[in-house]
Image (spheres, grey):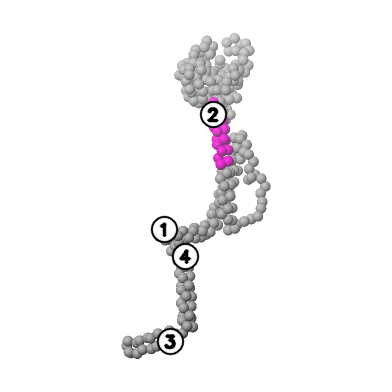
Amino acid sequence: MQLIITDAWLAKTKTVHLGGFKLSLIGFVFVVSLITFGGFLHTWVYSSGLVDKMVSLGILNSSPIATVATGSVNERYVKENLAALAQKLGDLQARVDQVESLAQRVSGLAGVPLKETTNSLGKGGLFLPPSELGIEHLDALINQMDEKSSQYLDHLTVVESTLFDQKIKKMMLPTQRPVANALIGSKFGWRADPFNGKTSLHTGLDFAAPIGTPIMAAAVGSVVTSEHHYAYGNMVEIDHGNDLVTRYAHASKILVKKGDLVKRGQVIALVGSTGRSTGPHLHFEVMMQGQFQDPSRFLATSEKLMPNTISQK
């Protein structure tokens, strides 16, 4: 092969002869340079994040090359963030264990036992730091936490229902003092009848107070009696469910009627001295399945009854 080189300024011509060996050597050097440049260009494109930007902008979305590039970017992204994801899952696992411990304590208070779980059993095994965990391990851990959280949610729902039932039952127990700041006259039990002096059973508590003092419902319930009785005078009876009834006697005025729903602390009557009574007071009774009970057992335990200073019926 012969090349003729002409210099326009010097008006000279130079002839270069290239044999087969020289041409092969030049071709080899060109191919190696091209491959080296291509490798450098590939490395620069990926290290500079150019592919990421092109994919995010949608430039590579329409070609097969884009699919390969996107897959490579996603795989690299997953690998780079695998350790951080594993650490976050470890923190979440610790919180799930804390929720389990809390569920056990709350269950004990509610009287609803929590089934034994793996957290309460012996544990052990090989220590694998987050960098050595694979996608399969993380997926299994996520599924395990999802199952445990679902179990705790179902159990805590039962606990909530139980606590709600207990709260309702407590609200329906006559623990509210029916007359505020009143002295206790005759207590529940045997005593000398104030009219004839003979021994008789006093079936309730007497709260001494001026006429017109508000009388409050001791618990939530339904009014079943609102009438005048020859012995109890103007009286109100409230049914609290479960065969539990309270009676409020000797009132000067009744403020509710049969069938009314009343809440704890609602004013239902005013203190008086109607019926078989020696002076203004409230005669308060509690009956369970028709049997008289000591009202002091139902009143709030934090409340101390005031001393017996007046004896009335």
**Mark nearer the N terminus (2 vs 4):** 4
Amino acid at circle 3 = His
Mark 2 — residue? 168
Mark 4 — residue? 46
Give residue 173's quadrant in the image. Answer: top right
Amino acid at circle 2 = Ile
Q: Is residue 91 in view?
A: no
- Do tag 3 and tag 4 residues touch (Cβ < 8 Å)? no
Secondary element at image label 1: loop
Magenta span: 150-172
The answer for how far apart the CA atoms under marks 2 and 3 are is: 110 Å
Query: How dense is the environment of label 4, judged by Cα within 10 Å: few (below 14), some, or many (20 and up)?
Result: some
Left or right of 200 in this view: 9: left
Secondary element at image label 2: helix
**Mark nearer the N terminus (1 vs 3):** 3
Mark 3 — residue? 17
Magenta segment main secondary structure: helix
Query: Which one is closest to the eye, mark 1 or mark 4?
Result: 1
Mark 1 — residue? 62
